[in-house]
Image (tube, coloured by chain):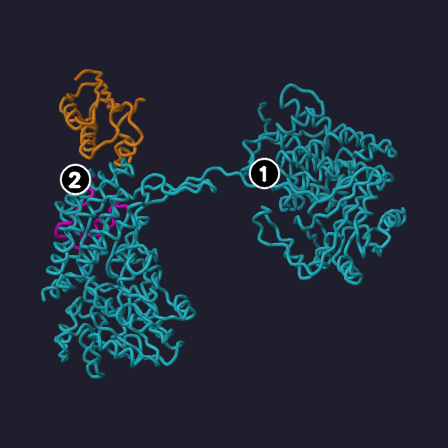
Amino acid sequence: MTITSEVAQHRIRVPHEREPEHSEGATLRRREATHETSEQTPVLSPERIAYLEGLVKQARTAAAVFTQFAQEDVDRIVKPMVLAGLEQAQYLARLAVEETKLGVLEDKSLKNMVATEFVYNYVKDKRTVGAIREVPERGVIEVAEPIGVIFSLTPITNPTSTVLFKCIMAIKTRNAVIFSPHPNAWHCCKEAVRIMYEKALQYGAPQGVFSCLESHTLEDNAYLMHHKDIGLIDATGGPGVVKAAYSSGKPALGVGAGNTPVYLEKTADLNMAVVDIITSKTFDNGTICASEQTVVIDDEIYELVLKKFADLGAHICTPKETDLLARTVIDPETGYMNPNAVGQKATDIARMVGLAVKPNTKLLITSIQGVGREHPLSLEKLFPVLSVFRAKSAEQALRICVDVNHAGGLGHTAVVFSRNDEIIRKFGEVINAGRVIVNSPGSIGAFGGIYNDMVPTFSFGCGTGGGNSTTDNVNVYHYLNIKRMARRTQAHMWFRVPNQIYFNMNAVENLRKLSSRSTIVITNPYMEQMGHVDTVRRHLPAETLVHVSVIPDAEPEAKVIMQGVEALNFYKADQIIALGGGSVIDAAKIMKLKYESPEADLEELAAPFMDWRKRVVEYPKKKVCQARLVAISTTSGTGSEVTPFAVMTDKERGRKVTLADYSLTPDVAIVDPQFVMSMPKGLTADTGIDCLTHALEAAVSIYASPYTDSNAMQAIRLVFKYLPVAYEHPGDEEARSMMHNAACIAAIAFSNAAVGVNHALAHSFGARFGVAHGRANALMLPHVIAFNASVPTKFMPSPNQRGYVAHKKYATIADLLGLGGSTTDQKVKNLVSATEQLLDRLAIPRSIADLGISREDFELALPDLARIAFDDPSWRSNPRMPLVSELVELFWCAYRGRSAAKHVVGSQMQSA
Amino acid sequence: MATALWVKIDGEHAVRTLGEIREKLNGDQGEIVLDFSCIRQITPPAVQALEDLATATDHSPVRIVLHRVNVDVYKVLKLMKLAPRFSYLN
């Protein structure tokens, strides 16, 4: 046969790129080896270069012009091309068989029809121009962008069908293609390209959209593979072609050889399986790389299956015949298929080997005892020789299939026949194949659209196992750059508050409405001394058993929490009343969490997060029991009675554990001013400023919403009006009541909008120098307002805000407080001044220096202060992203003190 | 060649018109404005004609200005690396 000599002439090297673990697959070569590219610098004559440049120029122009076409223009061209392909299917099949001497005319004709009709059926309604997919709910539009010029290598085994397929895909996606057919299939491919091109031109495609290399050489391929104007290499063929494509440095689709294992399991429909395998393996004389290579048959059905094969025209080879075949059709030295056998009929192969078979023999079946180079027939055989293996168990069968898969078939195709879903699933898991065909023929099944709903194709992606970039059946979407237009979306926001909030004097009476069999009151010694515990006890229903648990008046420790949980368990509490300030209420929140969900891992739940909705950890939903948490606040600052936060100290590890989840929010909040009437002046001032800081930070937070704004603004108004009164006249019931409400309202605001950089600074400074939280906040507050109102060095990403609004928010607050000013700048300055005046009136030290902290001590601490403040999550909702250097500057502002400090860090925002 | 010339390009005769302009270039200094307002799509021969015209004016003092080139045609010129070889007027 002439093919052999041509193959020999074209073969320049044998790459061993597949099968890093097993040499058998790597050394297996077939005639696609002739279709490689030289990796050396191409040596081409100036005339040849001019010719190739002309092809590229023509294709590039066509592709550029093609970008102007609409979907309708493209679809108008595709349909007549498909019809032309169908009309010429048999003609092209005849050309292919005559030229390649491979395969079966009828089957090649069928392949041409699949490549046109089935592919058209898949693509006809697909949008491939402009917006191809819209997802309105996600604000995403996918837009198609053509690739430009595609350099396409086509194989000897499916020559014309591959050309037809790629032409249809290219027109549908507005790309131009330069074809480089296998040298032994050049004439038939050129004719297929001509038919497609002429029809495309007739219906308006740009000139030069398809071209076919004239009598190309390996150097041509190398030149084009490295050409700057080639956008994509689409290489269908053997491993050499694929490797050359991927080695070119160009984006490439390289899809190549396989070695399809088949597991014929004992529960399978044997009649169907045997017919399917014969149909598939003999289709086009086995030239399709997805065709069955080794069938692993369960022991129980082995003899029966062989009989069925024999009954339907297969010749079951004797061991001697098998040995003869193995030595003849596979080169024992290299593991290559004998090119004379590829694509030939079973009877011709038998004659070639010297086997006596019946004239109507369709298939030669050989029994193998293992897989690998020492068992040559376990390798890929693109001719009607099928190996069978008798498996003693399902486990062994699966192992042998894995071996075959790894002997040159990684990523390609595999087949399983079974009625056992578990076996089918296991097979799919252990076999590395882009196509796992179930209860149907491998080769025809892999095409897609005939035996299954896979995408019709003539290029089988083999994934990384086959050195490919995809495991897909290559289709139009691989010929497109898909752009995603993402519209700005507003994250869904929330506003959550406790179920019940009772407020005003004697609101504690509402406890009577809360039925409970066993209640535990968590409180601190001071509350007990003040008689507040008795007050609570008096207001509980008579039938409620009440137990009191007194905990230290400090940030709760793990030990205290667990003692509380023990008590809750002991008394089987169905209600917890937290009576105290932030520490007591926080302790009660954590006790409830551990009581209801003993498995809750506090350490894990305290993991940092950026977005409530996307956080990694989830708070437990399973509860072993349930208890109502009633929070009665006895300070007017933290607002812990309505917040979803709780802080505890882990003394063993020497750190704070901050928990945040809406499930921590108390079920009932009682905001009764009778419990704060006796608050000392200093505590009144500090907690009041803490409340003001919550409200101001929530107002400018990136999570601020109209819902939180209404609460923040009202809280700010109440603080400016009533805090000085409550401070100067502690017995003023109205002022106490309003400040108690303000703390709760501000907490509702920051529970939903979070706080900002002021809290980050205060946390760091307060912890280092032992300064009360509210007072630490106060020292920073005027400086932070000025900082946020100036032009940020770095903006904080904030999809919910349209532009930078912090300075405008402050101006609105100044208006609300009636501070005057005609510009935003003036209003911000007035707000800063009003805040400073309020702090002065509350006798809060003007600076860190006024606290008695020396400049040396402060300076020494400053690097740590800045580092810890930067690690604090609070600032992540601040409108302005602080640089570490800016945190340092803010600390210095606070050290120098209000009035003395130059407030603004950065330049002033322009007035709106 | 006149020092300023305004030429309307229409789809049907674009290649011929562009070829005529190229042939008439005689080294004079000046500006040729090609009015593309009627061109919705450009064809491969018209792209080639534009390229030839650009090449012809590469070393001449004549400046070719394209008037009202729609963005689809502009993208074709961009893909063909022809866009920077012309000036644009809207």
Q: Name the mark on residue A417.
A: none
Mark 2 surroundings within 10 Å by alpha-carbon count, few (fewer than 14), some (14 through 19), many (20 or more): few
Q: Amino acid at mark 1?
A: Met
Q: Amino acid at mark 2?
A: Gln
Please provide percent x and percent y for residue A720.
76, 29
What's drawn in magenta, residue-wise? A205-231
| Near-viewer residue (A135 or A331) | A135
Q: Circle 2 — which element?
A: helix
* Residue visible at 36% across and 71% down in the picture: A418
Q: Is residue A547 visible?
A: no
Find disc 1 in the rendering and name its residue: A881
* Residue visible at 81% across and 56% down in the picture: A517
Q: Is residue A342 visible?
A: yes
Asked if residue A210 is among those painted magenta in the image, a careful observer would answer yes
Question: Image quarter for residue A714?
Answer: top right
* Residue visible at 22% across and 16% down in the picture: B4
Position of the N terminus of chain A, as image quadrant, is bottom left
* Residue visible at 19% across and 40% down in the picture: A58
Q: Using the image, determine if residue A103 lies above or below residue A643.
A: below
Mark pair 1, 2: CA separation: 61 Å
